[in-house]
Amino acid sequence: MIRRSVSFLICIFLLACLSPASGEEKAGLVIMVYMTGSDLESCGGAASDDLEEMMRCLPDSPQVRVVAMISGSSTWRLDIPGDETSVYEITGEGLIRVRKGKLRSMGDPETLTDFLTFAESRYPADQYALILWDHGAGPLVGVCFDETFRSGEGMDKLTLNELTSALAGSPFARKKLSFVGFDACLMATLEVAGAMTPFSEYMIASQETEPPCGWNYAFLRELTGREDGEAMGRAIVSAYAESFRDSPRPVTLSCLDLERTEDVCAALGIFFENLETGVTAESYPAYTHVRALSRALGNSTTSCFDLVDLPDLIGMYHTEGLADGSELLRALDSMIVCRYSANIDFVNGISIYYPFDNKARYESGWAAEYSRLDFVAGYQSFVRKISDLFIGEALMNWNSSYQTRLQEEAGTVRLTMPLTPEEMRNIARARLIVVEEIREGVYQQIYVDDRLRCLEDAVSVSYHGEALYLLDESGEILAGPVTYYPVDGGIAVHGNIVYDVDFTLPFGTFRTMDAVRLIYRRAEDGSLSFTDMMVIGDASEGLFLPSGTGIPSLLGLSLVSSGPVGDRESIRSTADYGLLDWIDVDPSRGAPCLAFLPVYGRHNRYAYIRLTDLQGHTAMSEVTQILNPSLISIAPESICEDSDRMVMTLKSADLVSGYGAGIRLVLRLRNRSDQRFVAGAEGAAIDSADVGPVIGDRVVLAPGEEDEILVYLSGESIRRTGVAEARSISVELRADYDDGRSERIQAVIPVSLNTAVFSALGE
């Protein structure tokens, strides 16, 4: 009897040990969120936003439970301690801390293993899913950047091998996750899919950078706990597509069937093993042109990650007659369950690393890092062979400088750089760069264009005399030209921002400043629309700030003008670029409004063409002065205003022909008052006909100072007045004094001008 009682007690004890310590009922689905807040949270509360979104969208059913390990940010908008790495259950009523933990790095694989082990033990379920939330930077950099722990120069993070190690040490080395999701940038690659295949049935990730707000967690509402990984993947992609349907920025998300990874990797290995046999120094240009023409991902970031759309790359080999990738493309098509992309072409759902644009990173560490990945041997061998040519001895002997032909045609300037057929075959990219000499030996970069035409024996481009200007809502120029750089489908401008880190604190209590990169998308009509803002200068590779730090909420924003300093030959050396000026922007008025307009300055402008060959070497054309538009005087120098407060003198009034046709006026102001004032042109008229807003400078004059204001009336605005024979031009200026007074002054300039000349010249 005693023996039976002891046996009974032992059974009870064993059952207790095997049951969840908390007595949790078994759920249909447990979603585990590894939420690394990083600067996405500390700079704007993006992680807190998504936690609140999960709380709102969580279905009212015990069959679906969400548990999160939350850490990695110095501060949190929600009531989450920054000095803990704790586990919370996410409920409709809020966050419930189920395990308190000391601060640990979210970039340590043991931290992730510990979380997965705890969640699987504490929350029994029929199936589990994992979401990794934070920055992502592709297979060679990693995911989940922890700003509370530093590794080298940047945040500690999970590399792909560390992520694999963490999963291998977890319960999900024995039973697969229904899906692993990356609410992070740039993780939809075959390398990542291959690493996740032993541990998960499906993978959801983005090929492109993600908006800081990330996924749309409304998909949670429809879950019952019985859906499989494919159904959940489709729901996640669909919700993501719905939330960014009207977004102007490039967005992508795809769901991949990891059961198909083995077939894809086998076909990939065979394809590139066959391709590698044809790689020689002679064939290198043809092979590498395919890479240059294929869709690259993540190029709007400050650091290129050398990710390329895999189906587009394989299709390009077929288009160029180098290989038949039909079997590989069929395997890829079966792997890609569903995908969404907007505002970006030739994106098919999965990327791959192929070194080309970021040569320096490949040579300094990425080559070794890639070889350490457990990835397709045939593809890695191909990458090594073609990259040996990429970084090896120069295959082309470029001249130190090439002649540039300059020709004015149809109101524009055409620049042409003659080349040999061999040189033409080795061009990867060509770029026009225009600089303006703002003072002796100092030049500002005012125009850049990558849209050059490649002819049989030359590269050629037309320049319409434009530069980038900062405008207000009415179209008035506030400042410019602004230095910018082309990015895929748009432009980027650089600057500094100042903002409140914790928006719940009083104004000015906790501020920080970051260098940023503002991205603008360029429409077919040339107009620009703001899409993104990114931090630059951190070793985490220029990752996106959270949407909570949108431009309207900033305390300060300044854009950068830069260019080369030195003699004329140094214009071609980007290494000698320096900061020239800060352009302050009022952030309360929203994103800066930028537009390309004809250059109305008086400085000399110079242009050159820079080529980049298929090995990353550069070749330059000679620096050529672009002739300023022809000027025909239409009025003599005269005094327009002479009072005890101001003297205004017309220095010149000229008819401008060629590109930027119009009328250019130069007015010299002298401050005779005892107050500082700011003066600028408010409007103009031809005879009595209003020409609308004018383009002109603004000057700030202290007592006794003098300076010139340039005012420009475009030919188009003059034509719209309908005045055929102009007898006068009047310009209205406004001077705003420090004491709050404003004064309007009108300069009337007698002329005799047939405005039909503008119809003949065109714009």
Image: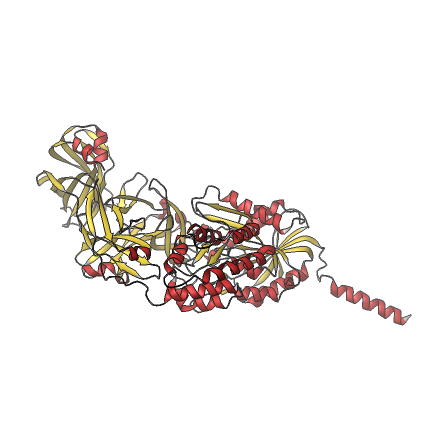
Q: Nearer the viewer, residue 273 or 732?
A: 273
Q: Is residue 639 left or right of residue 580?
A: left
- Residue 24: % across, % down: 71, 57
- Residue 319: % across, % down: 43, 50
Q: Quadrant of residue 660?
A: top left
Q: With respect to residue 366, does 129 lie above or below?
A: above
Q: Is residue 188 left or right of residue 32?
A: left
Image quarter in which the N terminus is found: bottom right
Image quarter in which the C terminus is found: top left
Q: Nearer the viewer, residue 120 or 295?
A: 295
Callout count: 0
Q: Would residue 735 be seen by someone viewing this image from the given angle?
A: no
Name the residue rendered at 24%, 61% in the picture.
399
- Residue 375: % across, % down: 53, 64
Q: Would residue 429 be seen by someone viewing this image from the given angle?
A: yes
The coloring applied to the image is secondary structure
Identity of the residue furthest to the bottom in this view: 3
- Residue 60: % across, % down: 65, 46
Q: Nearer the viewer, residue 386 or 1?
A: 386
